[in-house]
Amino acid sequence: MELLLNDEQTMLRDSAATFTERRGGADRLRRQRATDAKIDREIWAQAAEAGWLAILAPESAGGLGLGMTELCLVSEELGKGLVPEPVAAVAAVARALGASHTMEVLVSGDRIILPALMEGTRSIGD
């Protein structure tokens, strides 16, 4: 099956490909892995600036309001370019958060938010 992309999807995929050509690669990944940093802050800020962290968030909440196809296109290019930052995971969390201050902080890329799935004897949903 061949996926036919519209102009917006093609532009998004191409911008992610260009980004990974310039900022990704095995050498950068090796250097990053040799440090204690789990996330490259510069790459993270650029991903936020490109709007990738807000790709699934609704436009009414300051996101791009796009769908899973667009997120997959970006994720595929990041994977090809060996850029392991958790863009897809953060985009999914941003969508789940909806219009909230936490979502705004998350998609800005200024802070890295880690969900606490379990604390003591309590877990999500308690």
Image: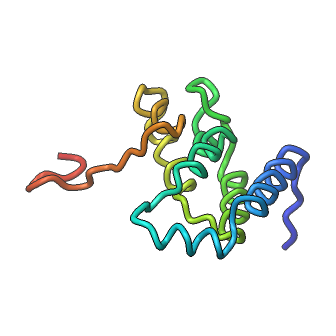
What residue do we see at 42% from left, 45% from top? 112
In the rendered view, would you say 107 is above or below 117? above
Examine the image and state in which quarter residue 74 appears: bottom right
What residue do we see at 72% from left, 51% from top? 70
Which x, y percent locates residue 45? 58, 43
The number of callouts visible is 0
Which x, y percent locates residue 84? 56, 65
What residue do we see at 91% from left, 46% from top? 7
100 sits left or right of 52 in the view: left
Task: Give the colouring mode of the picture.
Answer: rainbow
What residue do we see at 52% from left, 67% from top? 32
Quadrant occupied by the N terminus = bottom right
In the rendered view, would you say 54 is above or below 75? above
93 sits left or right of 54 in the view: left
Which x, y percent locates residue 60? 60, 23
In the rendered view, would you say 37 is above or below 91? below
Which x, y percent locates residue 50? 69, 41
